[in-house]
Amino acid sequence: MTPDLIIEGVSKTYPNGVRALHDVSLTIPAGMFGLLGPNGAGKSTLMRTIATLQEPDAGSITLGDVDVLRDKDAVRRMLGYLPQEFGVYPKVTALEMLNHFAVLKGIVDARTRAEVVEALLKRTNLWDYRKRRLGTFSGGMKQRFGIAQALIGNPRLIIVDEPTAGLDPAERLRFNNMLSEIGENVVVILSTHIVEDISDLCSRMAIIGGGRVQLTGDPLKTIDSLRGKVWKKLVERDRLAEYERDLSVISTRLVSGRTVIHVIAAARPDPSFEEVAPDLEDVYFSALDAASRKAA
């Protein structure tokens, strides 16, 4: 059984003064773990730190008996990483490129390497396209190829950073189905700002905002914690500022040219508000709203 990934007190400030991470502590068990937050929240900084691509200013990260920050070679042998920006050589075929990655991962025996590459291309539904140049792949196919290279060497820790951003709904569904199959016996960290990906895939999650962990838990239990506390109302746009001043407005959206607000309150703010069955988006926005109010 893959041990927990334990992150304790990790902080990072960049030379330009931006403090990307503030004393981040998380325990991430085997399975799919969602790291949810807006762009600029610190997610990618944390992922790059776990992947040994940059050093934190403080803190520790361990996976079982491996010190992630000190024993980088050991981490890289057990790591599969799909970064947010995954570049490919457009004129190289999928078969050639995956074979090259396998060599880099230390699979030097030609027969073993051929078996590994074939198995991964079939697992990611790319076998029929193995002789096509990567530059002709769709966005979803490129992401599946990215997962194929991340799975070389049977990693115990897999990190995927914003993997479905830019994919169409069908490609996103195929990609998420593949991730769910992978994340049964290893630690898989899914870093994203897409709430639906977390609710579809993850049994544990953390919400990060402003470089701090704002909430952790089981997505379903966090949703249950908001039952009876989320209210909605259709309001005139010119009155939005008034509601935002007087109530905890966690989200707004346009419906037929009018604005629907969601409000967090222990009781119905007034008879014009309708109770809403909460979802993970409400959890997400309420956590970020609470963090912004605390910071203010």
Image: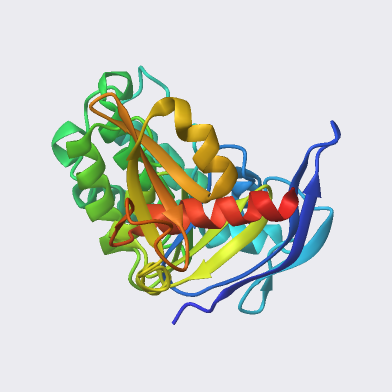
Q: Residue at x 68, y 64 (%)?
A: 68
Q: Position of residue 14 (x, y in %)?
A: 81, 38
Q: Residue at x 27, y 51 (%)?
A: 176
Q: What sort of colour scheme is used for the picture?
A: rainbow
174 vs 71, left or right, is left
- Please tell me which residue lies in front, 54 or 207: 207
Q: Residue furthest front?
A: 271
Q: Where's the N terminus, which quadrant?
A: bottom left
- Please tell me which residue lies in front, 8 or 117: 8
The number of numbered discs placed on residues in the rendered structure image is 0
Give the image quarter of residue 144: top left
Q: Residue furthest bottom?
A: 1
Q: Residue at x 43, y 67 (%)?
A: 267
Q: Position of residue 238 (x, y in %)?
A: 46, 25
Q: Is residue 121 visible?
A: no
153 vs 294, left or right, is left
Quick check: 9 above or below 195? Answer: below
Q: Position of residue 195 (x, y in %)?
A: 38, 50
Q: Position of residue 202 (x, y in %)?
A: 36, 64
Q: Is residue 169 visible?
A: yes
Q: Residue at x 33, y 61 (%)?
A: 278
Give the image quarter of residue 31: bottom left
37 vs 151, left or right, is right
6 vs 114, left or right, is right
Q: Residue furthest left?
A: 128
